[in-house]
Image (cartoon, rainbow, N blue to C red):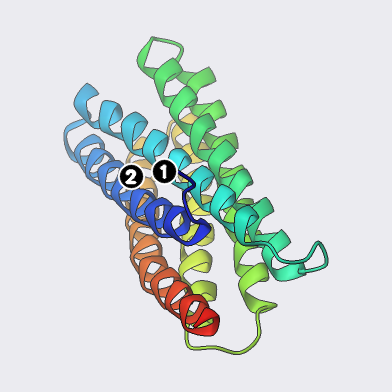
Amino acid sequence: MTIRGEDLLISGTWLLAVGSLIDTIGQTQQTFTHSELGKDLIIKGNGIEAFGNSLQAIGRSKLLKSERDLSQLFTIFGNWLEAAGNTTNSVGVSIDMNGAEEEGIKIDTLGSGVQGLGAAFEAIGASLEEDSSYRTLAITGNSFISLGSFLGAIGNIYVINEKNVIGEQILLVSSWIQFFGALILINAITQEVEHMEHAEN
């Protein structure tokens, strides 16, 4: 049984939103209680997001009709970058939890930067799409995720420099911005898939 590209795209986007929600809950706990449970949720959330990004990339690769389709190529590249960034975040927070705090935070910062870059590529990819009902939503959703990710990297830099309170607050805001971006993307991708299916019939 082959899984359709459209199904992978929708599943990946929902997983991205679920992972982002878990990450946001974890970051909220971490900011207010500094508990290990918060970090544990952040690791799990980023892992789920990375899996969701990978499904999106595979789904879009299956749907790619032309090697010259710059919009889709940018988006696929962005998906894989986001998957790498989220995986790096998980690794960084795990290292932090296991006692090597500064090293872990540095790796987490790198992951957030890579994730932000990936979402920026996806926003560029969406901007190259022909005008449609979902184009603006896709640009907005990916821009939110990109902004949130870069803010996460900035928050970590504050934490490394022992400005923990402001750093944790920036990290909290960044995780909520990414979550809202993921919710907007669900709407964008659902409309895009409906548009694809309508075009096929």
Up the image or down, 99 lies above or below 3; here it is: above
- What residue is at 25 percent from the left and 38 percent from the top? 26
Residue of label 1: 49
Marks 2 and 1 close (CB-CB < 8 Å): yes
**Spatial CA span between label 2 and label 1:** 5 Å
Q: Is residue 90 above or below residue 8?
A: above
Residue visible at 23% across and 22% down?
36
Q: Nearer the viewer, residue 143 or 169?
A: 143
Mark 2 burial class by Cα count in 10 Å: few <14, some 14-19, many 20+: many
Residue at 60%, 35% in the rendered image = 110
What residue does disc 2 label?
19
For this orientation, the residue located farthest to the right is 68
The image position of residue 60, as x and y in percent, is 59, 58
**Residue nearer the viewer, 3 or 48:** 3
Instruction: Say which quarter of the image contains residue 76.
Output: bottom right
**Dot 1, how many residues are within 10 Å of its Cα: few (below 14), some (14-19), or many (20+)?**
many
- Please identify the quadrant where the N terminus is shown: top left
Q: Amino acid at mark 2?
A: Gly
Q: Is residue 55 left or right of residue 171?
A: right
**145 and 131: which is toward the camera:** 131
Residue 200 picture location, percent across and down: 54, 79
Q: Amino acid at mark 1?
A: Glu
